[in-house]
DNA sequence: CGCATAATTGATTCAGCTCAAACCGAGTGG
DNA sequence: CCACTCGGTTTGAGCTGAATCAATTATGCG
């Protein structure tokens, strides 16, 4: 409080973001899939035009209805894309590192359809629109890569629609957790990286329902203790999720990492 | 029956598509927004690599899980993108003339996530993948235009998610009808171009519910007599749809025409 | 500790689904 | 011309999954 600032209420009010400038991790930048196959010199030009930004937990990165400044790439953290309407928010997508933040809106100067909020401390790289435009113009490969990412986000959205329409709340939850587990296949203990409240939003249900559904899926072999996801019976869990409305489950070869 | 073909059962069985080759309307082709700003000579190269196809009502254009042959542009008709699971289908998007059919899947050789079915007699133009790839590579403008279309479809999908999550069935229906009306602003009597059954699918509800919701919205100034949409009280109807979760309603400046 | 926020639990309600029956309009055949 | 069938639409009567409301119990965190 000594700085005249109550942190808790600051968090609650969703204070207008005051991101800090951050250094751009150059190697990480170059390794990003949208630069795959792009001439190094061109990538460097984009790198020149980039700045790093760091948002702290719960701060808002884009507000719906507003415009975006340039192509934004998430390097660290998780960003919740959601429509917020007063108190209840309804999630659309959860962006992970390497994902592009609302590429459509930034490339075509549209207004954002959803609000983007940092769920955890988030670092992004912003590439100046002018540079992006120029490079898009000249490098077909780059354009193709970006398109790939956009189209991957479309796929995620479609899945979401399908889930919402033809899966039960419990199934959606189960699938989501299994996906998380698969994504952290290397790590020993898979973790739920966000608060349950946000998860509920993303899955199109209330926090209360989520809580109850956790009990349901526990009987199907999926347990959540603290933030640890424990799958006791994968076969049964898979079975419970129901016939996959969509076939393949590894989309990382498309430039999507979103949840 | 004289052709040894029972039309009703043929329709019902969703006969594997046997599209007819059709001529490509050259002027229409050239006028398509994805060619805007593209050098005429380049457009002609794509034109060379194109074939027209005509699908009859109810035939399937792409089946989910299958691949697509090339960039497909809808010239006439309506295509329903839906996940079909046995008898009940759950719609995702309704494509109109000028829309691209699953651009992501065709450009990146992914499997289609959804089935595309012609709701009405549909004509499309297919551009050979090799030609598309080549032109994407060399023309940044073309790449940009295609990307614009993809990103527009993403927006539609997001709206859909938002609608599904935070609007009632009646509201979704009302909005959809109003959108149709606005889209046919020039025509004297706006028309519902598809069967109610499909509409229900697209809106994420059952046919029965749709029927009931029609009664509800009738009390709010929107009437459907036969296939004619009659809005008696636009102000009230707009009011009923609730605060628009998304701002602008004209998306035609993006390359999207879908419903 | 003590306060605020997050998560659970229980009771109740309600929107939309399911199932079944009636209805309707168009094409078909006697 | 009328009866008949067949798809699609409507109507009605339950049922149910998930939301809501309210109260309680954890879980940080300063």
Image (tube, coloured by chain):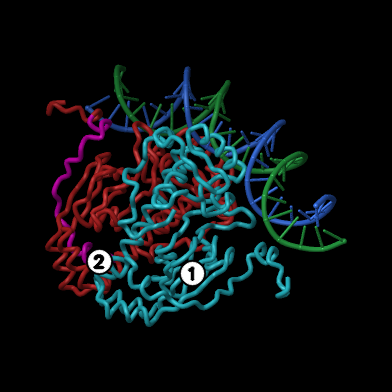
Chain colours: A red, B cyan, C green, D blue
Rendered view: B178 above or below D15:
below
Instruction: Tell me the crowding category of disc 1: few under 14, some 14 to 19, or many 20 or more residues within 10 angstroms, Cα based.
Output: many
> Which residue corresponds to the image point at 45% horizontal and 55% vertical from the top-left?
A158
Secondary structure under the numbered disc 2 in the rendered image: loop
Image: magenta residue range? A10-35
- In the rendered image, residues at marks 1 and 2 fall on the same chain: no
Q: What residue did someone put label 2 on?
A: A31
Taking the spot 54% from the left edge, 57% from the top edge, the residue there is: B83
Along the line of sight, which residue is nearer the eye, B171 or D18? B171
Q: What element does badge 1 sit on?
A: strand
Q: In which quarter of the image is the N terminus of chain B?
A: bottom right
Residue A8: name its quadrant. Answer: top left
Visible residue check, residue A164: yes
Q: Disc 2 sits on a residue from what chain?
A: A
In the foreground, B88 or B220: B220
What residue is drawn where x is 49% and y is 77%? B22
Q: Residue B183 carries which label?
A: none
Asked if residue A210 shows in the view, the reply is no
* Residue A252, percent from left and from top: 38, 63
Q: Residues within 10 Å of mark 2 (few under 14, many from 20)?
A: few
Spatial distance from mark 1 to mark 2, Cα to Cα? 42 Å
Q: Where is residue B75 in the image (x, y as percent from the top left)?
A: 44, 67
Whether residue A197 is in magenta: the answer is no
Q: Nearer the viewer, mark 1 or mark 2?
A: 1
Above or below A247: residue D10: above
Quadrant location of residue A39? bottom left
- The chain that hosts pointer 1 is B
B6 to the left or right of A117: right
The residue wearing badge 1 is: B123
């Amino acid at each position: 409080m000594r700085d005249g600032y109550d942190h808790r209420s600051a968090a609650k009010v969703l204070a207008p973001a005051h991101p800090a400038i951050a250094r751009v991790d150059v190697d990480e930048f170059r390794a990003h899939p949208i630069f795959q196959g792009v001439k190094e010199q061109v990538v460097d030009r984009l790198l020149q035009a980039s700045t790093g930004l760091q948002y702290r937990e719960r701060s808002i990165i884009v507000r719906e209805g507003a415009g975006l400044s340039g192509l934004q790439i998430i390097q660290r953290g998780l960003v919740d894309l959601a429509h917020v309407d007063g108190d209840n928010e309804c999630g659309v997508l959860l962006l992970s590192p390497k994902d592009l933040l609302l590429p459509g809106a930034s490339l075509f100067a549209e207004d954002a359809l959803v609000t983007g909020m940092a769920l955890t401390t988030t670092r992004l790289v912003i590439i100046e629109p002018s540079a992006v435009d120029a490079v898009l113009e000249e490098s077909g490969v780059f354009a193709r890569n970006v398109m790939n990412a956009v189209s991957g986000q479309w796929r995620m959205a479609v899945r979401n629609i399908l889930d919402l329409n033809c899966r039960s709340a419990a199934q959606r939850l189960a699938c989501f957790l299994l996906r998380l587990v698969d994504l952290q296949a290397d790590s020993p203990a898979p973790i739920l990286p966000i608060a349950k409240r946000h998860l509920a939003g993303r899955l199109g249900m209330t926090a209360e329902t989520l809580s109850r559904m956790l009990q349901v899926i526990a009987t199907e072999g999926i347990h959540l203790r603290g933030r640890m996801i424990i799958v006791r019976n994968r076969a049964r869990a898979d079975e419970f999720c129901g016939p996959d409305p969509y076939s393949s489950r590894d989309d990382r070869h498309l430039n999507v990492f979103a949840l």
